[in-house]
Amino acid sequence: MTMAQTHTPLAELLDGQRTPVTDTDAQAWRAAGWWEERSIRSLLTDAALTHPDRAALVGHRTYGGRVSRTYAEFDANAHHAASVFASLGVGQGDAVVLMLPNWVEYAEMVFGINEIGGIYAGIPVTYGERQAAAILRRSKAKVMVVPRRWRSTEHLELSRKLRAEIPTLEHVIVLDDDDSGLREGESLWSSHAGVPMQTFPDPNPSRLCYLGFTSGTTGEPKGAMHSHNTLIYAARQQAEHVGPKVYGDPMVHLVASPAGHHTGFVWGIVFTVLLAGTAVHVDRWDPTWGAQVIRQEGVTTFFGAPTFLQDMMRTDLAGDPDCPLKCLVIAGSPVPRNLPAQAQEALGAYICPAWGMTECSILISCTPDEPAAMQRTDGSVFAGSQVRVAGPDGEDVPTGEVGDLLMRGPGIVYGYFDRPDATDDSYLPGLWFKTGDRASLDEHGWVSLRGRSKDIIIRGGENIPVTDVESLVFDHPDVVNAAVVGIPDERLGERICAVLVIKDGRPQPTVETLTEYLLAQGLSKHYLPERVISLPELPMTPSGKIQKFKLREML
């Protein structure tokens, strides 16, 4: 770390992007040790020096079987990737977009982009043309890496449509063995095998290195700007908050969340390297296949939305005394309050509810150092960060009351790329970020999420605690998944609708039967759903979040 790195103004490092984070904030975080002043690439360098022969990456592919890399191979391949991207004109501050399944090459390319000081952005491989175009256009990516095809999508053809409308996209690299029909500006990854190796200066840790595009549960994604410092802070604190050995020693991490999404990138790729663990990538999520992989590889850890955990509990991992899982971190959408205890008993692993978002990774997490009652909440705040729960007047609400969740700390996003309007709208004075979530704080300082602000149902002037209702509905013995949303009503403003996925062969609940069940569970009559709809499945993002805006549109 040089003095120039320490004191380079953020305005210079962000190339004019708007951020409310000041140089004073940054210096305070450095002085306290929250910003470690190292690059993400340096994490891999260290792991490769310390554990060169340890398995770093294992890939289980739908087509092609199992592949693996040691840390020495991972490090060498990342350096090769950096040289490939540099040979195509990618330099410091240029963006590269990866639109790939969870293959081991994904992690190698991420660290390669990082090595040259580039900006990584991911597009989940399941996204369509409209979503991909928005991310490519906003990021101004020079290079895009795709499979020729994946499942039902022809990604090479998709990339051609995108290049035709996005002039900044100069190169498309295809991760495939078939070079037939490639056009100008298109090349196989393997065709760059002989590229001369280059050396690159370590990037400034405060520089923008990642655009995390929000998952679109509420509309068009925005590019959240993160640096090496903000991402490593979150990863380090999650490790320390829970305890590094709780994840396994060494950790073997199942990466099932899409690497193109924030969860798969930060927790599947960066976090695993931070702990020098083994990342086991699966390129699709199938619970039965996933259970086989967990046993075969001795998987100890998983990060993802509650949907994945619910799936695991319906496999033969549940009740198996030899289940290798040690810790499952559940974040990304509301956690049904009885789920952690049920899953902990079934799987024999520590179930760790947590809260985060693309704009701060994870900031709140449970920990086995606290009483088990914590697992009925979303946990406590990381060291170095703060949260507030505020009312409409901006003042803190009393303990136990629900308000708007505000947060600040060393893992906070710089703002939104090329969206100074969205950046300014997201912060209150004092660098308090408006999360858009509703929450309450208890006497222990534990945080309980109570739904998104846009999820609030106001029925006859009364705010309905959406997550409380959802948790009870989810516990119904016939329910696989559930969401509670508001539907317009001329007299009351909104009424409550429960949207359910029912187990095969079970009767469809009616308003009357669901009411009887919920009243028996102690739910207030004011909070009872007044409409019940059953669907084969709920609309989800690739990372397992329920897209409630689609349910509202449908209703």
Image (tube, helix red, strand yellow):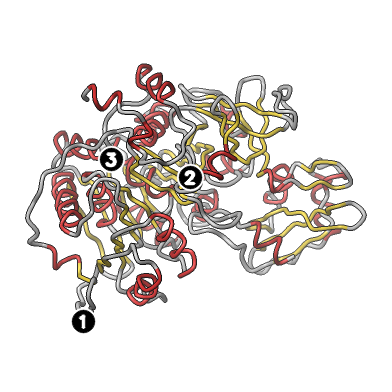
For disc 1, the neighbor class at 10 Å (few under 14, some 14 to 19, many from 20) is: few
Q: Is residue 293 left or right of residue 22?
A: left
Residue 126, position as x, y percentages in the image: 44, 66
For disc 3, the neighbor class at 10 Å (few under 14, some 14 to 19, many from 20) is: many
Indicate which disc, 3 or 2, sits on the residue closer to the N terminus. Answer: 3
Q: Which residue is mark 2?
A: 416
- Residue in view at x 14 percent, y 49 percent: 73
What amino acid type is highlighted by mark number 1?
Ser
Q: Secondary structure at mark 3?
A: helix
How far apart are the two marked residues, 2 and 1, measured between alpha carbons? 39 Å
Q: Secondary structure at mark 1?
A: loop
Which circle, 3 or 1, is nearer the viewer? 1
Indicate which disc, 3 or 1, sits on the residue closer to the N terminus. Answer: 1
What amino acid type is highlighted by mark number 2?
Tyr
Q: Which residue is mark 3?
A: 273
Q: Is residue 282 left or right of residue 380?
A: left
What amino acid type is highlighted by mark number 3?
Val
Which circle, 3 or 2, is nearer the viewer? 2
Residue 421, position as x, y percentages in the image: 56, 44
Q: What count of labels does the image hold?
A: 3
For residue 366, which numbered disc appears in the image?
none
Residue 102, position as x, y percentages in the image: 34, 58
User: Does 34 appear above or below 501?
Assistant: above
Q: Which residue is mark 1?
A: 180
How far apart are the two marked residues, 3 and 1, measured between alpha carbons? 36 Å
- Residue in view at x 35 percent, y 77 percent: 157
Q: Quadrant of residue 429?
A: top right
User: Does 314 appear above or below 398?
Assistant: below
Residue 512, position as x, y percentages in the image: 86, 58
